[in-house]
Amino acid sequence: MLKIDGTMSRSVLAGLLLWAAFPPLNWWPLAAVSVSIYLTWIYPSEKLTRRDYFAIWIGASLCWLALLQGIRLAFWPLYAGWIALSLYLAIYTVAFVGLSRVLVHRWRWPIVIATPLAWISLELARGYIITGFSSCLLGHVVASHPTLIQIAAHLGAYGISASVVLAAFVLFLMLDHGRTIGFNTKSHSGASIVLYSLHRWQLLGACVVLAAVVGFGVWEVSRNKAISENNPPLFSALLIQENAPTIFDLDPESNFRRNDLSWDNYLEQTRIAAKATSKIDLIVWPESAFTRNEPVFEWNGSATLPARLIEDKVDVMQLERVVQSFQSALEDRVTRLYETVKFATDDASHPYFLLGNDMIRIQGADYDQFNAALWLGPDRTIKDYYAKQHRVMFGEYIPFAEYFPILNRIPGVPRLSAGEKSVCFDLDGKASIIPSICFENVLPHFLHRQILSAEMRSISPDVMVNITNDGWFRGSSISDHHLANATLASVENRRPMLVAANTGLSAWIDGGGKRISVTQRLQAGYIHAEPKRDGRWGLWQAIGDWPIRVIAGVCFILWLWPTTRKKRDH
């Protein structure tokens, strides 16, 4: 039996404090306290045992299990996914201690430099490994405080995380100086006096950097206020939210009735929102909210059919009837939508719509089913669509299913294809809108790559719009974590972010990370947003996460670099 010693209790305490720093408690200063506990394992030169590292992993696992417990609410098999993901993410905390010790004790890096760089290197790694997971970065604990997040315009959320680690270092020295550093130089040896001097300068450097981060934030927030006061709105938008239940149900009839009711509720909420708004240029529905059990078909009319349809004994004539049926259903839904808005506003003009809908594309022998965002024009036709590129593992696809087809038979999991490209929607010349779906805005490098791709086509997106169905998580803190990602993304890219989320949290966030409007969770509602062009330059916009990549590359090379030193750190 594992003995509950000092290492285990400290680890559990560190994990508990870090969890409390995030929503729902949101006691964000505790993040620095938590990291300062990890520094107590990094600073001493004595080697850590495997038992020590195991205790650190246990505490971190408990933290992640608490942070991500909302995942289990989506579908009972996801209890396994929730546990597996939490245990996996806890490995990065263990790696942080190990990597930091190597940099400090083997390569003699100052701890004030080694620990922030080690932390952000590992945050970057988990943003890419196994398709990436960049929710609950350390910097997200201050996502609701615009003054503290402006550095993200140049270093991304990673820069904020590094600042939190620096704050933890300052706290560590302040709490531990009497025993470890020897501030009372009269009663210590010459070595202690040298150590005191060294840490004094490290402490001073950390405080200067933190003061600079806050000072920069104050300056940028004042600039953001000027932008808000002086720049005219680009357009007027309605973000529609309903409290529509989202349930994995293998009964087609139950699914149909639930989706049908959800669609009617969204239509009614759109009527309410339109009636209360004088001018509307754009109306946004969340992910999959417009589908109503009726996907949009894109078929080139080829006589060659995909193997999937041939196996189901579908011929060309049957497919043609199905496509015509769904096209007729789409036209009916679009007509009802526009007539509802026209009746509510008594206005001859028609807005654009950005609508979450399933899409099936058949081109010869190729069959693709997408989670898509439709761009509906005032003439009631689909002008363009965006197919989701970054799919959710086990929720939208099964890894390696192309090699093991039996995996596709797992009930309740759709076989969705990945979109091939980013898309920008033109809002009648008023603005260019770049969409993302669901957790695509959780990956900072993905959004940057989307915008960069548009700019290479000589299109500069003005506003980011995320449509998502967070109803899977039943109002848990997963919605708060998602909102934190959206907030940091707006600062990183200096563009407003509009979020339309089923069950919430829908939001209007400006280019400075200020949450101008956020809906209540698990309630029907809407947001009337009038986003404004930001226009500020940032290093992140220019080169993305490349500085962090270079830092991570150096750290990982030094971690793995063979050494001939007799005393090696483990």
Image (cartoon, rainbow, N blue to C red):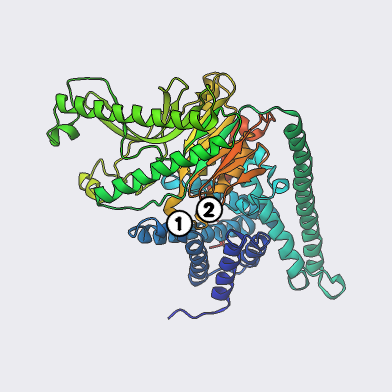
User: For this view, does 486 lie left or right of residue 255?
Assistant: right
Quadrant location, the N terminus? bottom left
Q: Quadrant of residue 473?
A: bottom left
Residue type at mark 2 is Arg
Residue 145 place in picture, x, y as percent? 69, 50
Q: Identify which residue is drawn at 64% across, 55% down.
A: 115
Residue type at mark 1 is Arg
Residue 400 place in picture, x, y as percent? 29, 44
Q: Secondary structure at mark 2?
A: loop
Looking at the image, the residue that sits furthest to the right is 186
Residue beneath disc 2: 521
Residue 321 seen: yes
Q: Secondary structure at mark 1?
A: loop
Q: Earlier in the sequence, mark 2 or mark 1?
A: 1
Looking at the image, the residue that sits furthest to the left is 313
Q: Identify which residue is drawn at 52% across, 40% down.
A: 272
Q: Which label is found at residue 255? A: none
Frontmost residue, 544 versus 104: 544
Q: Identify which residue is drawn at 49% across, 28% down.
A: 342
Q: Which label is found at residue 474? A: 1
Residue 437 place in picture, x, y as percent? 46, 38
User: For this view, does 64 lie left or right of residue 209?
Assistant: left
